[in-house]
Amino acid sequence: MKLASKYGEVVQESLQALLEDQSFLPNFKDEDRENAFKSLESILSTPNQIQKSFLRVPLENGKILRIPAFRVQHNNAVGPYKGGIRFHETVEEDEVINLATLMTLKNALHDVPFGGGKGGVVINPREFSEKELHTISKTYVQNFCDILGPDKDIPAPDVGTGEREMDWMMGEYKTIHPGRPYRGSFTGKSQVNGGSLGRREATGKGVYYTLRYMLHNFVKENEEWFKRNDNRFAKTALEHSDRPLTIGIQGFGNVGSVAALESYSCNYLDTKVVAVSDRNVTLYNGDGLDIKALIEFTSNHEGDLPTTEEALSEHEIKAEIQEREDVLYLDTDVLILAALEDQIHEDNVDQVKARMIVEGANGPITLGADRKLSEDGVLVIPDILANAGGVIVSYFEWLQGRETQFYSEEEVFSLLFKKMKETMDEIYPQFFNDPFALRQNCYIHTVMKLSNILYRHGKLY
């Protein structure tokens, strides 16, 4: 089997770089070393399990649907499988494998003691009633209950799901497994069901924090060194530090709206969000959008941004209406991608003007486009680093459920930022000292960690 995901090619490059570094896994020499690295490639390129089922769902109109559903368990060397469940009409097996692979790598990078998993159901949730979605959620747990559990595989929300669906799923897990521990079976739950404060905002806050920490903290604290550094990414970072920045955000759901609000309220960077988009529209205002007003509007309109001049006027929102894809091509300093995969690709990458891009979504830039951006000195903060806030706070939720002691929201965000800072302090110095893009640096670090663990588990013989 070929490398199972779009991330596999970068993993392969990371393994090649580590193969040539004789100080890494020094006990393996010559042919034994080549065989060990072939073992690593094989292990990291394929999931441990791919579970597929067709959910039998009775609809309110009397019809019966058979809906494809997946759960992929990529690797559990570090701990129980962990990853979201996506409700979306584009879900398919390869995509779920991709996302499960990314979860393995992301958790290892941030020293979160989970492996990688992912789930998906092939539906557009907007086309189903609340009762039908409840049935779909319960049926998913019924069909996959043997492989789920607090110490086996712990799902969380993803695109198209939220705390409501996690509450339903945990309730069904509890019904199926009476008397067993159940609070840690799902994360991203509501607070009354053992969910953590701050879980909904965690990913968006983490996304903005990676940008803020790089420009406000890391560059400023090392400013003289940056001025002497001829690394192309160091130059891009220095150019964006300590000056006003315009930001465009693709996607205005939980991740994009929270990142927008963080920027809107930021006391560390001089930023203004000039463009936001969703599945319908891009809204633009060169003087800065009223993010609080937009969040209030979306909360009352099923998550959608205003799409007409009348709606904008009625809610006193000043913005120009543009096509939904336009946010990608506006002349902003920073672009935050918080929608879906493959938004910037080989066919449109030349139209992207932003010099800094933060991946709030998983895989929003194809590898070919990423290489082109890297060659041009565009600094991309990749998904594996930027959007880990959700799984980190999911880990805190899992811990709180086991200990039955709960953190305040302030404690949750303090712990989140501390965790992400530790990772960035490990990654950034090396990144700004070598020619690799930040994505490649992150992969080398995470592959190194996973390789060491697999070696100590005796998996490379």
Image: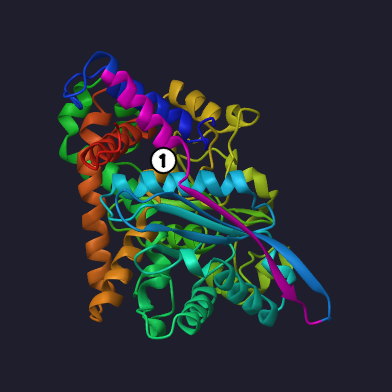
Q: Amino acid at mark 1?
A: Pro
Whether residue 123 is visible to the viewer of this picture, yes or no, is no
| In this view, 184 is above or below 202 | below
Q: Residues within 10 Å of mark 1 (few under 14, many from 20)?
A: many
Which residue is at 44% across, 62% downward? 258
Residue 26 % position (x, y): 16, 23
| Residue 96 as seen in the image, left or right of residue 186 | right
Please identify the quadrant where the N terminus is shown: top right
Q: Residue furthest front?
A: 461
Residue 91 % position (x, y): 64, 53
**Label 1, on which residue?**
382
Is 395 inside the magenta-drawn segment? no
Which residue is at 38% across, 69% downward? 199
Over which residues does the magenta segment extend? 32-60
Q: Nearer the viewer, residue 245 or 131?
A: 131
| Residue 152 as seen in the image, left or right of residue 69 | left
Which residue is at 65% across, 29% downward? 347
